[in-house]
Image (spheres, rainbow, N blue to C red):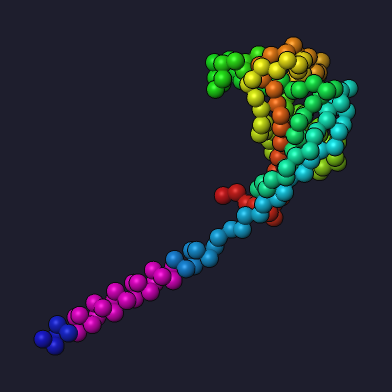
Amino acid sequence: MEKFKITVVRLSLGVILIASVHVCLCAEQNSHVEEFHMVQDKSFSNVTIYDMEVTCGKHRPGMFPSQTWTCNDIRVNGMRMAYGYYPGLGADTRCTESGGFDELRQLCYKLMESIASNRQLWGAQVSNASCDYIEEKRVMLNLNLDGYYWKKMDPGYGWIETLQCVAFPKDDALSFP
């Protein structure tokens, strides 16, 4: 009977030791949670890019994981920017007049350059667009062998309301695994 009590006590102490080690390891693991900084976006000023005036309207600021600039109600010489998908790949079959070709990344690069941003462009994203028909001429930035140019398009399906330009996170603000 005495050996049984000693075995039970040892087993209980072993279980308590294992549970304590588990709790300590979990606490150590959970203490290494990275901070995630959110940054309020800014808007662009009106600027001339490739001989056309790009204008941005007012926008409601949002929070982003990296510095972001927003151009809401974007227009080029008063025209809406065309929007669309590659034919056969998009969610809306009407929204293919642009063929999915545009140079939004270059537009963001030039917009960021206009505000003297020293941040590297991470990406250009259209956060608000429509595939509805618009009874206005539209425009899109394209590239050919001679360089970038604005292509004017007739009224049709697809236009951009909001373009956002996102900068790479600063090294000290966000780390990638």
Q: Is residue 108 left or right of residue 175?
A: right
Residue ID at (77%, 18%) = 139
- Residue 102 at what x, y percent from top left? 70, 22
Q: In the rendered view, does 126 fall on the left or right side of 10? A: right
Residue 87 painted magenta: no
Residue at x 17% of width, y 84% of height: 5
Quadrant assignment, res 150: top right
Magenta residues, start to end: 6-25
The answer to whether residue 145 is visible is: no
Q: Position of residue 55 (x, y in %)?
A: 83, 30
Asked whether residue 34 appears in the rendered view, the answer is yes
- Residue found 85% across the figure and 40% down from its top: 115
Q: Position of residue 20 (x, y in %)?
A: 38, 74
The answer to if 7 sits in the magenta stretch is yes
Quadrant in the rendering for residue 8: bottom left
Which is nearer the eye, 23 or 57? Answer: 57
State the residue at coordinates (44%, 71%): 24
Is most of the magenta stretch helix, strand or loop?
helix
Q: Is residue 85 above or below residue 36?
A: above
Q: Is residue 101 above or below residue 26?
A: above
